[in-house]
Amino acid sequence: MQFIDSIKSLFGPAPSISAPKARIAPACEYVIRPLTKRHLREVTLLNAVCFPNGDSYTRHTLDYLLSQPTTLSYRIVTEENETVGFAFVMVNESGTAHLTTIGIAPEHRRRGLAKRLLLHVENALRVRQINTLVLEVRVKNTAAQELYRQKGFYVVQRLNKYYTNGEDCFLMMKAVH
């Protein structure tokens, strides 16, 4: 080990490499509004930012979701009307809703926006007398799982190789009262 340390000393200290810092948006007020086909381009771009590495929905899929009468879709916007978050929920005739996707722009995270969107979704479901909300979340996405647990979701089942990269997910469920 001393030999390796002496060789390292010939080259000097290792350079300090740090990851680039994520841009943090300035503090502002946020409002939740309906998400419509008029916002398709904007939400498609935001979706790609929120879910890199092939996890994002295609424009075609988002267009499909927005065209379905059983889909509830919301966006969270800044004071300048910039969309910084979104949620899509599909409702079926059996009284169950499926949170298909929810995303917050990285520079606006850690501000409780996902919690606000979830609460908004739940209130909309109550009005429609929908009593169950389900979602899937990656097994490795412990931050999202913690958020969902805090909001009353619990794991119902582990689904093997659910995602295109072969990763498992947890099916989570919540009774909406």
Image (spheres, rainbow, N blue to C red):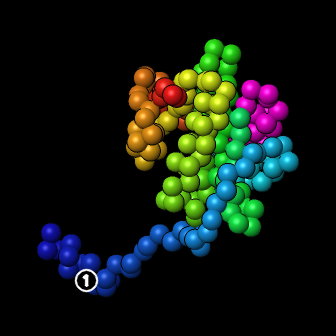
Residue 111, x across and y down, in percent: 51, 60
Residue 42 position within the rendered picture, expressed as x and y whole percent measured from the top left: 77, 54
| In-image side of 27 versus 16 (left or right) | right
The residue where tag 1 is placed is 9
- State the residue lying farthest toward the top: 94
Q: In which quarter of the view is residue 58 placed? A: top right
Classify residue 152 by image quadrant.
Answer: top left
- Counting from the top left corner in percent of width and height, residue 12 is at 31, 85
In this rendered view, identify the residue nearer to me: 57 or 172. Answer: 172
The magenta stretch is: 57-71
Residue at (63% x, 65% y) in the render: 29
In the picture, the quarter occupied by the N terminus is: bottom left
Quarter residue 55 falls in? top right
Residue 65 colored magenta?
Answer: yes
Q: Residue at x 44, y 44 (%)?
A: 147
Q: Kindly tell me whether residue 133 is visible in this rendering.
A: yes
Q: Residue sitting at 65 percent across and 35 percent down?
A: 124
Q: Is residue 38 magenta?
A: no
